[in-house]
Amino acid sequence: MKNNIRAEFRTDSVDLINFFIRHFRKFIIAGIAAAVISAIVSLLLKPLYESTVILYPSSNITEASTLLGEASSRAALFGDDDATEKLIQVIESEQVRDYLKQKYDLARHYNIKPGERYPNTLLAEKMDKYLRCTKTSFGSVEISVRDRDREIACAMANDMAARADTIFNNLQRGAAFVMLDEITRSYELQDRLVRQYEDSLRIQGGSAAFRIYSTLETETEYLGLMRGKYLEALAMSRQTMPYTLVVDRAVVAEKKAWPRRSIMVLVSTVSVLLLLALVLFVVEGVKLHRADDRQ
């Protein structure tokens, strides 16, 4: 009759110490092998260099201003959280991405062959992986770019910041051109109306002239207001405003950002040792179970 009491491996400190002593040689060999292999692999991997830009959104993004760009006296130098979110959205927009794709020929730079089934998807995944734009705890925006070429990583980070400013100005000037066109038509109509009243004033006499003069005075005053708006819209359609305030421009990285050889070796070694310990635990448990079944 088999013994119903099974021998089980205890997880107390004495058994754990004995367990590691029995398999000490295996752990040493496995640890050294994992460290050497991971170090060799880290040397074979192509290093990535990282450059970073720190910038704040200008208050021009959210603060109301006159058409001449005269900001309110209460306006702060930096934008608020809403401005930060808008800046991040512009930096991550397709306009910025398309600009980088064309300027740096990123499809070829990332070794995406023309015959790939989904080249645009692969390129988007690469850009998501290597180009980052995040909000910091200080309310600023951090642009970080990683690349195998340290010069390109630096140039791309600075270009992303500069392109965001260009996009904001293009949007502002586009809106100003539409406004200018509408104000120009209104101003020309008002100018013709004033000239008609002036002509009527020269022809008419007596009480009729007095009424025309009163109306002419009002219409001329309104024409002056229209002219002011016209000049403001014209100035706004031509001006360039700062929408980003760069605190730290990207510089060429001296050290690689990835892979971190020491961390890679440490993580790989610890992972192998933990896996080995788990396997040995299972093997000893199976042996004890079989020995118990034979009793």
Image (cartoon, rainbow, N blue to C red):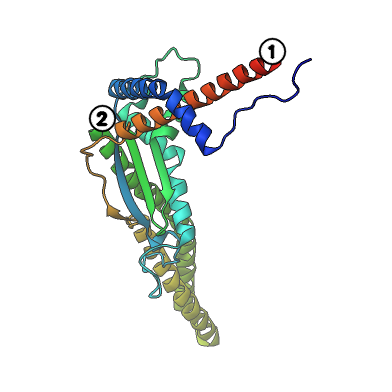
Q: Report the side of 56 relative to 211 (left or right).
A: left
- Of 271 and 97, nearer the camera is 271
Residue 185 in sight here: no
Q: Residue at x 54, y 83 (%)?
A: 211
Query: In the figure, 256 relative to 72: above or below?
Result: above
Rendered residue at 30%/36% (across/down): 257
In the rendering, at what x and y percent does residue 234 appear? 37, 59
Q: Position of residue 69 (x, y in %)?
A: 37, 64
Residue at numbered disc 1? 294
**Quarter occupied by the C terminus:** top right
In the image shown, does 294 or 114 lie closer to the viewer? 294
> Which residue is denoted by mark 2 in the rendering?
149
Amino acid type of the residue that numbered disc 1 sits on in the rendered structure: Arg
Q: Is residue 288 left or right of residue 124?
A: right
Looking at the picture, does residue 79 appear above or below residue 131? below
CA–CA distance in space, label 2 to label 1: 65 Å
* Residue 247 picture location, percent across and down: 29, 56
Mark in front: 2 vs 1? 1
Pointer 1 local density, CA inside 10 Å: few below 14, some 14–19, many at least 20: few
Question: Mark 2 falls on what kind of element?
Answer: loop
Residue 236 visible? The answer is yes
- Residue 191 percent location from the top left of the image: 44, 66
